[in-house]
Image: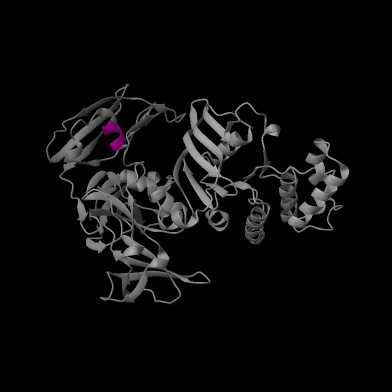
Amino acid sequence: MFMEEKRKIIQFKHIVKSFGDQVVLKGIDLDIYENEFVTLLGPSGCGKTTLLRILGGFIEATEGQVLLNGKDIKDLPPYKRELNTVFQKYALFPHMNVYDNIAFGLKIKKEAKDVIDQKVMKMLKLIGLEGYEKKDITLMSGGQQQRVAIARALVNEPKVLLLDEPLSALDARLRKEMQYELKRIQQEVGITFIFVTHDQEEALTMSDKIVILKDGEIQQVGTPEDIYNEPVNRYVANFIGESNIIPGVMLEDKKVRFDDEVFDCVDVGFKKNERVDVVIRPEDIEIVPKGRGLLNGTVESVLFKGVHYEIMVETTPGTTVTVNMHVRDKDANVVRGEDECISANDFYLDLEDMEGIDETEIIARADAQAWDPKTDEQLSIKDIETDLKQEVGEYSVTFKTGNGLSITRKIWVIDQHVVENKKANEAISAFNFFKTTDEIQESMALDTDLMVWANAQAWHLDNEDEPVELYVDYHFDQDKIREGVYRVTFSTAGREFKIHTTRFCEEGKEVGLTFEPDMIHVMEKMGF
């Protein structure tokens, strides 16, 4: 016996939408079937509401077709389309009671009074508001108002109901209740619901099918189970649920290497030695005694989340480099003239950075600037003189204004040491640097400025164009800094695994981690 194949009710065919120069939807192709609960999921600005509004007829696509039951509905106004919309703001009529709000569309269609009465009472029963028909709409709770908005849309018997983030205005407890209520209503009325949200829990709870969008493009379409267990890339894995995502290499079918170890997995179809991302969900990792797992690490933190503990285990220490910050008095780097001032810092240059260096970069590295002391207006630096060569050594550089006021500083060209961490597949470097007390005290974002001043950077060893996030650590009070030499440390996070478990484990304990081959999911490396 063959199962009846579901019928396509909506087809988006290469939908493109531009607002001026901004392309919001970039060629959307999507089929939606009858009686499905479909969720369009993504962050603000991904294009999900725009797609819904094109379907509803509120805006027109720049390119492409929208088919409803096989017919192009491009030229149909919203009120002639066999669908209704429930908006973020329910748009109920405050001067009408519950009955009249629900009956509004039927009265516009001039249906018989007894038919209207039957349909409205059926809707009130469906949404659990029997006996509320004469209630003032303005005296109802947010959840009750939302049910009335849904009933007003459903009473017109649309083929499709569109819901644009209808739960966003509700508190957390009521929102959770309404998730189950919406799913129950959809199953009972047996029509297609298309739901827009940025909330992953809503999508997982209610949907038959989830469509994940990013920057106007579909990333993945699938059931909640498919999306959660088999995300196609890092973006989807991060957006749905919590993830441990690790860069790796697919050696061959069912063999993947990450963290300098080779693991069995169930994935096939990748090229040999293809760079990939590996995702392992926190609930799929088990903590075992040290030496008895696939990886060993140290418990960094333990957080009780009510149902389970969230435990962070570091398996690979971060990569670290420490530099000297030479701090001088605020006037040490300033030369003052009658009508202008000029300042600049000594600085270090890596030998590799010498090739192609120009005056603009030298000015930036020295943070050289000139100004009118009466007005603080910035003045131009007109001339730079330097004996700088593409060789390791100590050099001088002189910066001059148009009136001839000058300041001379030092440049040290060094063969910069790079700290490599092959197990973590990363490297890091940073320079000693010079600053004045006022430059540090006036910084509005000191962590960021310290990274810029030290030219601190980290990258993956197997792909120097792929940066690694850096953190900075220092032990001085920004507001009370004095002349002297201060140590500034830049480091990467290392490899940490997040584990969800019902078993407590104390911080600092050395443990093992284990997981089954089918808990490792290999994804294509995502380009940005």
- Where residue 69 appears, x then y in whole percent? 59, 37
Query: Residue 116: x and y, percent?
Result: 83, 45
Give the main secondary structure of the magenta stretch.
Answer: helix
Residue placed most toward the observer, 401 or 315: 315
Direction from residue 16 to residue 361 in the image, left or right: left
Q: Tally the numbered discs.
A: 0
On the question of residue 98 being in view, the answer is no
Q: Is residue 513 above or below residue 248?
A: below
The quadrant in which residue 284 appears is bottom left
- Compared across the picture, whether 480 is left or right of 24 comes to left
**Which percent across, then down, holds residue 336?**
35, 32
In the depicted structure, whether residue 266 falls above or below residue 68:
below
Q: Is residue 362 magenta-colored?
A: yes
The residues colored magenta run: 361-365
Q: In the image, residue 139 lies at what x, y percent?
A: 82, 53
In which quadrant will I find the C terminus? top left
User: Of 513 and 213, which appears nearest the observer?
Assistant: 213
Q: Residue at x 32, y 52 (%)?
A: 277
Can you say whether 142 is above or below 215 in the image?
A: below
The reply to whether residue 149 is in sight is yes
Query: Magenta stretch containing residue 511, yes or no?
Result: no
Q: Residue at x 16, y 31 (%)?
A: 387
Asked whether, in this view, residue 415 is left or right of residue 158, the answer is: left
Q: Quadrant of residue 401?
A: top left
Furthest-front residue in this view: 1
Name above or below for residue 265 compared with residue 503. above
